Amino acid sequence: TGARVMKLPNTGAWILFVSRRFARVDGRGKNALTSFLASAGIAFGVMTLIVVMAVMNGFQSGYIESILELSSFHVRSYPVSQTETAVLVDFLKDSSLVRGFSPFAEAQALSVGKNGCQEAAFIRFVPENILETDEGFANQISLQAGSFDLSGGKVVIGSRLARVLGVGVGDTVSLLALSGSSDTELLSASRVFTVSGIFSCAYADINASFMFFSLDTAKRLSVSPLVYGIKLNKIAQDGKFIHALKQSVPNIRVESWRTYNKSFFGALKTEKNILMMLVFIIFVVVAVNIFNAMRRMIFERREEISVLSALGARPFYIQAVFLMQGLLIGLGGAVPGLLLGMLISVRMESVFFIISKTMYYIQYALIFVFNPANLAFLTENSMFMFYAQIPARMFFGETAVITLFGILSALISSYAASKHILKLSIAEVLRYE
């Protein structure tokens, strides 16, 4: 006549009740250790991935913001006539998408400092009052010496470039070879400028190559054409802005930050994706362990499963019991991992300080035992202090995906392991028992 199907007054409550009964029994012995190690593996994976991504985001954001604010802008526009320039300026003033804009010109040159020291330099001609008109520029640039004074043919140069040329504030640099239009003299010994300031930013290449001059200097050196650098309220609105600009000035040439820095930003994105993929392997290993543990647990529960089935419980409900256990394992690992990852990311400076001190004292103990004569040369690793200065940045979307992936890895493993329940023969199990 067939088995009668159990009618459950509250299916969710029944599943939770049976799951808690199983968990109470499994809370002792080998199964308890297996569940703990599974949750600990998920917690370690979530914590590691959150911390790694936060450090990587902070590291890359410093680069990206310096490049966009000091070098490439969000959008570049290249007007070719005064009429086109006037229309462009009117459009930029009226656009709600625009945070600010400024004209500039650029060239490349061979710079010469003290004692004949030479280095290739990237020349940027900007308005003299750019620190007042461009807040993003002012926030990203940090003056190490002197002032940002471009008046009277003065120059502000990057810190690494200043070291290579051997110059400081008040010294002079020469531009022996300068690129530009046909009106620009390539070689000249008369292009001598006084250093008024030395700056630094988060991107080392800018520190090693950039020189800032005023637009008046560009006119004197016949460097052209002028380019308009445009900064938007939201960096992701570049496509919308370019579309609107093309409708007002159809033939104008524009370039987004996505294409101007395509190779560099593409490399950063690839690096980040590969790093995330490598750390995600932790979840794969944990998921395999959960799968094997759950398969063994289901095998040990054959009698209970058969009894529940004989009483009318549907196979799907019994499978949901083990899915509930997988969910608890996932939550028991993902939530602590999330909290620890956020705590470490917020206190990154303290973490690297502890690591630096720990490594130092370990090395001190080893050298003291095996080679005491070298103790005088032992110093702390300065790279830890450099890492400590990198601001960790957590993005809600990434953090949520990492946490959910930790939970899903346990759920998917439990589902794969519990599929065997649907094929279990009640009569066969009870006959052998």
Image (spheres, rainbow, N blue to C red):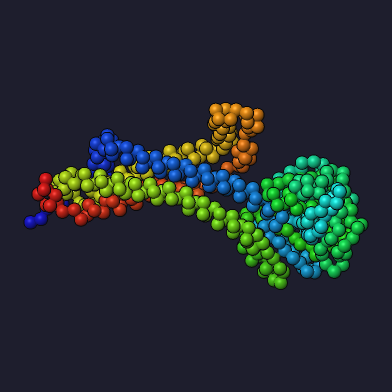
Q: Where is residue 168 in the image (x, y as percent from the top left)?
A: 83, 43
Residue situated furthest right in the rendering: 190
Please say whether residue 331 is visible from this viewpoint.
no
Q: Residue at x 57, y 27 (%)?
A: 368
Q: Position of residue 19 (x, y in %)?
A: 26, 42
Please say whether residue 381 is visible from this viewpoint.
yes
Q: Residue at x 70, y 57 (%)?
A: 72
Q: If the image is split into quadrants, where does the N terminus sit?
A: bottom left
Q: If the image is split into quadrants, where does the C terminus sit?
A: top left
Q: Position of residue 380 (x, y in %)?
A: 62, 34
- Judge from the rendering whether residue 373 lies leftward or rightward of residue 143; answer left or right: left
Q: Is residue 340 above or below residue 286?
A: above
In-front residue for pair 145/149? 145
In-front residue for pair 388/361? 361
Q: Residue at x 74, y 50 (%)?
A: 208
- Judge from the rendering whether residue 184 lies leftward or rightward of residue 311; answer left or right: right
Q: Where is residue 337 in the image (x, y as percent from the top left)?
A: 44, 40
In-front residue for pair 173/84? 173
Q: Is residue 75 above or below residue 57?
A: below
Q: Residue at x 62, y 54 (%)?
A: 234
Residue situated furthest bottom in the rendering: 251
